[in-house]
Image (tube, rainbow, N blue to C red):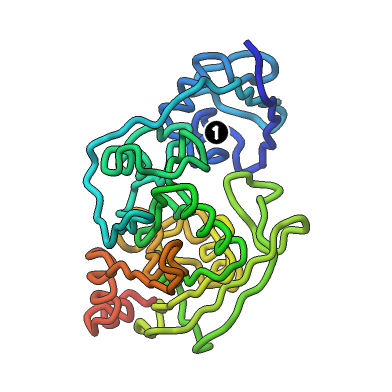
Amino acid sequence: MSYISNEKLHISEQEINMRLDKFLKNKFPDMSRSHIQKQIKDGYILVNGDSKKSNYKISVSDIIIVRTPKPKKTITEPEDIPLDIIYEDNDIIIINKPKHMVVHPAPGHLSGTVANALLYHCKDSLSGINGIMRPGIVHRIDQDTTGVIVACKNDNSHRCLAEQLKEHSITRTYHAIVINHLKEEEGTIESTIGRNPVDRKKMAAGVKNGKNAITHYKVLDNLNNKYTYIECHLETGRTHQIRVHMASIGHPVLGDNLYGPAKCPFKLEGQVLHAKTLGFIHPSSKEYVEFEAPLPEYFTKLLGILKSTAFKAEWRNNGQ
């Protein structure tokens, strides 16, 4: 067996006695627990040079090596998955992505993605610039972020939108609920964003070798001085940009257990973050077009709860 990489993982004091599979899940959040357990069972994960079971409890002195085998050639398969289509023509298709849906296949998520659904819906009419694993995909949003994304049906359209992304000329606005009361009505966060040098599963602001990132935000509503409903406009599109930037100023996105508190007072499944507006120059008409995805039901319900006087009274009665 040949490998394309051998990666040594750092173990912190907080991770001592953690199960091996849980430790690896934290390091590689895009991989499913079952995929990681299979990698352990198949001998791709070594602890002090030996294979271990998934329930092995790690220690700070352990040397954990993750071996990545050369990938087998795989092709994204068409799947009959319903899509919430906002707009479609011969060049582009605009989709309102639901929560929990991954945009394109990756280790641990080889099916059930937007790309699988697009192949079924569009058949052979998808751009091929990003290869057989990401047909038509120009950009992505996180698995638990909802909202508007665009895919391209031909290479010319793909190149046109990719160039606009590169030039930061595409309009991208997001709505979010963040923790704590934001006193400033609007502001701009500018910093580098790169891989967290200590925790590989995270990105971090202010990283020396990171890429420059700019997020503009404005307050839409103060939610009982406990949370804030905001709109964010992106100049750049770095991984986890809004989540990292808002956390860096003390206002993590509600429900984001990667960059915010581990415990959430509401039954949420991931961050309260929605890609609301996407605007760009159309590849064929050369005119500016803009598309919007309405807030999902869970988001509007949560807004109602956080605005209510009952929530304010409960918050005060609990001494918060």
Q: Residue at x 43, y 46 (%)?
A: 136
- Is residue 15 visible from the viewing direction of this image? yes
Along the horizontal axis of the image, is 24 left or right of 7? left
The answer to whether 30 is drawn above or below residue 300 in the figure is above
Q: Is residue 2 left or right of residue 133?
A: right
Residue at 69% across / 15% down in the picture?
49
Find residue 63 and report its horizontal and vertical position in percent: 70, 26
In the image shown, does 135 or 213 lie closer to the viewer? 135
Disc 1 residue type (three-letter): Leu
The residue where tag 1 is placed is 24
Name the residue at 43% across, 32% down: 108
Q: Name the one closer to the observer, 191 or 315.
A: 191
In the picture, which quadrant includes the C terminus? bottom left
Q: Is residue 305 left or right of residue 33?
A: left
Q: On the image, which quarter does residue 312 sit in?
A: bottom left
Along the line of sight, which residue is nearer the eye, 238 or 48? 238
Above or below, comparing residue 193 to residue 226 in the picture? above
Establish if 267 lies above or below 276: above
Q: Residue at x 55, y 78 (%)?
A: 216
Q: Where residue 230 appears, x then y in whole percent?
A: 43, 78
Residue 176 seen in render: no
Task: State the image coordinates of residue 99 (x, y, percent, origin top left).
Answer: 32, 53
Q: Position of residue 214 (x, y in %)?
A: 62, 71
Q: Secondary structure at mark 1?
A: helix
